[in-house]
Image (spheres, rainbow, N blue to C red):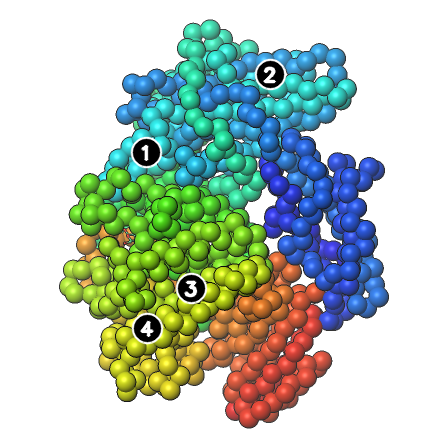
Amino acid sequence: MLSVKKITLDYELSLSGVDNFPVIGWEIASDQQSVKQICYQLQVSHDKYFDVILFDSGLINSDASANVNINDILLHPSTRYFVRVRINDNHGEESPWSAVAEFITGMMDTPWSGDFISAENSADKDNSKVTLVRKPFSLNKGSAVASAYLHVSALGLYQFYLNGQKVGDDVLTPGWTSYHHHLLYQTYDLSEQLQRDDNVIGAELAAGWFKGDMGFTRDRNYYGEQTALICQLVIHYQDGTQQIVVTDDSWHGEDSPILFSEIYDGEICDASLEREGWNNTGYDASYWRPVSLIPYDKKVLTAQSACKVEKISALEPVAIITTAQGDTVIDFGQNLSGWVEFKVSGKLGDKVILRHFETLDAEGNVYLDNLRSAKQRVEYVLKGDAEEVYHPQFTYQGFRYVKVESYPGKILPENFRALVLHSDMAHTGHFNCSNEDLNQLHHNILWGLKGNFVDVPTDCPQRDERLGWTGDAQIFCRTASYLMHTRNFFAKWLRDLRHDQTPEGGVPHVVPDILTGHCANDINLAAGGTHSAAAWADAAVINPWTMYLMYGDTRILENQYQSMKGWVDFMLTHSENLIWRYKLQFGDWVALDAKEGSYFGATPTDLVCTAYFAHSTELFSRAAKALNRTEDFERYSALHQQIVQRFQDEFFTQSGRLAARTQTAHILALYFNLVPEPFRERTVNTLVELLREHDGHLVTGFVGTPYFCHALSQNGREREAWELLLKEDFPSWLYQVKAGATTIWEHWDGLKPDGTMWSADMNSFNHYAYGAVGEWLYRSVAGIEADVDEPGFKHVIIEPTIGGGLSFVDATYQSIYGEIAVGWKVLDERVTLNVTVPHNTHATIKLSSLGELLSAQDVDFKQQGTSGVANIGSGNYTVEYLRA
Ligand code: BGC
């Protein structure tokens, strides 16, 4: 039976607020093997029964079931559309129509009739209080409501209400973007919630990233000085008429009981000041003040259709402890980003005060030092009701532990839970194996992602930083994209990257960029080094390329094309004879081969810069090829060859010694293919030697670490790669696991074997960068590898790296075509390999150490020596063999 299992729009099950027709994709279900789609038919309608068809593609002979574009349909704003598909396959079967996918359009080209309105005045510039705005309105008489769509955004953060109910599940909306160029608005369907006669809409507004204290220099008002709301509620009536309610000077404002709320410092709420029912009908707001209109460029407003920050899950306390110093501390057992929600009973004026932190110190006491100036403090003043429930709203905390500084009554676990916040993305990667420590490492990598994908990819979620450091996001991008569906998350962030690029193509160190022009306190940054560091700025090229590889998405390459090119050209302009460096470089950041107390690893800067120059130029030339831009392809692939040649001339001696004797230099040269072929073996041997000099340990930083295992396993040193991954003593990934980590640390020596910590000035315990080894688990251990020539896993290369003494590995990756599964079991020398390949894709299984093939139904291996290669279609396969 052939059917369409799932249909997606811009990779999501549904979208709310789109400006352009989304790309369509679907997954195919069938009980046959080797299923290929022969043709498809797509239809679009305004109604889910497809009574009236707006668009019918007819039968299209094509095997495309992902990234399908419909261009020839004219969309209308504030309108709902339904899409369905049916297909025929190579076995002569025809599917029924799929379930429907739906989307609502945003404002599109409609002008915003309303203005940004604020309940603050210019004196509030240094104030981070929360304000309220409200507007009563009545529906037009006569006809019933056919649909009502709200488009809304804010300068600052907002929560919107209709008749007392919060609108939408998202939080920290509208998120953080390069606000001057790009401000997201959200679209909500209120069709069912409007009341026949009187209605009230309103919003809470907070400082957030817009005007709150941000960055390690703790500047404020980066984007403006007053919070403000803009909205347009579009109501369509059955009789074809329309009513629009917008933000204008008829709204009124007031202060909220939330007296203070900021990203780093937390929230203070005095519930005794609550204006009960303020966001509903029947409330007397006659004492509220008129709002003021805030001039702001409305052209920067862009629809956000998915991937908003939400409350994803909740964790219960695992323990309540009293520390040696007598503090009461709640342990949630997991380092995370989010809020504590608590229940409390007490009298008017009683207080709950919580301090959030990541780790206990060596004596088991509360450790706040590594938060630097971030207070991570929540204070709640009770109104004195029987039971009050509260969590903050316009801040978030990075924590595992919470110190309870004040709480009326007994502190019981059932009254506290941690709400986990992050951008809403589908969970796509699962990994389980016989080594529990490795499973914990995978867990920690996943939680590093969760903790730091809170609207922008942040370096860390706890201290006074939480910035979109480009290097961290670049290093971790591929791993993240195995774990979760990151396409829409990175598409949003890359848009900001290109907005914040310098006219010359330089790429800021953080995106959204709040460093440029604001770094007077830091010598290096003040010297003009706020952009364009190797491995950091290369996010401009590597991240869009990774999206293409993982999701076959050419649109992101098109959107980022000039940005990618700009960055490659920037390096070219600033290079001298193709060797380049520029102002402040981070190099192999926080590597252990750095001088005592320094952050900068021992690998020479010009080597790191030039290696990345070569790598980004190569990827950009491939992007040009993918988009059929032949001239650029030829030009930049030739440039890539020249850079490689220069790298070799500059950094290799004539007899094949790489002049920089560091692990990272060798890793980069190997992984980026910069080694002259005759010297490859020597380079690999030296890397292994460099490992042995440290008793098998890495001393690499941000630049070398992500590719260490790849550089070994891709060069016949699988055993060494496994040994490196499974090292348990300091410094290693599993050392952190053994030390009880639940996320990935910023420093290998964040917590040293003697119990002391790396200096508190920069010691995060939730930094995803070193979690970049996660891609080795998927790409090599499970061996689920993408093919550049058929991206998005249209063709899967399955090449597991069996070893590490593991008796089994089970991994799945939910690709855009469906689930790819690889499981291997080893018993003595007998290996059983189970593989699932999604329909409408195909795979190549590559085995090394193949001895005798025992069984391989429907898999036709070509064996040469101890290697076996087989091409297979979709379906489930089992292969058994003896290892050579
Ligand atoms: C961040 C890093 C970042 C680095 C750049 C740090 O403060 O936490 O992850 O990449 O600065 O130097």
- Could you say which disc has been placed on residue 647 in the image? 4
Label 2 sits on what residue type? Answer: Asn
Front in this rendered view, residue 571 or 469: 571
User: What element does badge 3 sit on?
Assistant: helix
Q: Nearer the viewer, mark 1 or mark 2?
A: 1
Which marked residue is nearer to the observer: mark 4 or mark 1?
4
Could you say where residue 284 lies in the image, as x and y percent from the top left?
49, 8
Q: Secondary structure at mark 1?
A: loop
Q: Position of residue 787 (x, y in %)?
A: 56, 69
The amino acid pointed to by label 4 is Phe
Kindly check if marks 1 and 2 are in contact, taking CB atoms under 8 A apart as contact: no
Disc 4 + disc 1, Cβ < 8 Å: no
Kindly identify which numbered label has been placed on residue 199. Answer: 2
**Quarter of the image where one finds residue 221:** top left
* Residue 818 vertical position relative to residue 149 in the rendered view, above or below: below
Mark before the other along the chain sequence, 1 or 3: 1
Q: Residue at coordinates 46% horizontally, 61% vertically from top-left? A: 620
Residue under numbered circle 3: 617
Q: Residues under labels 1 and 3: Cα distance?
A: 34 Å
Dot 3 amino acid type: Thr
Residue 795: quarter of image = bottom right
User: Is 141 placed left or right of 172 in the picture?
Assistant: right
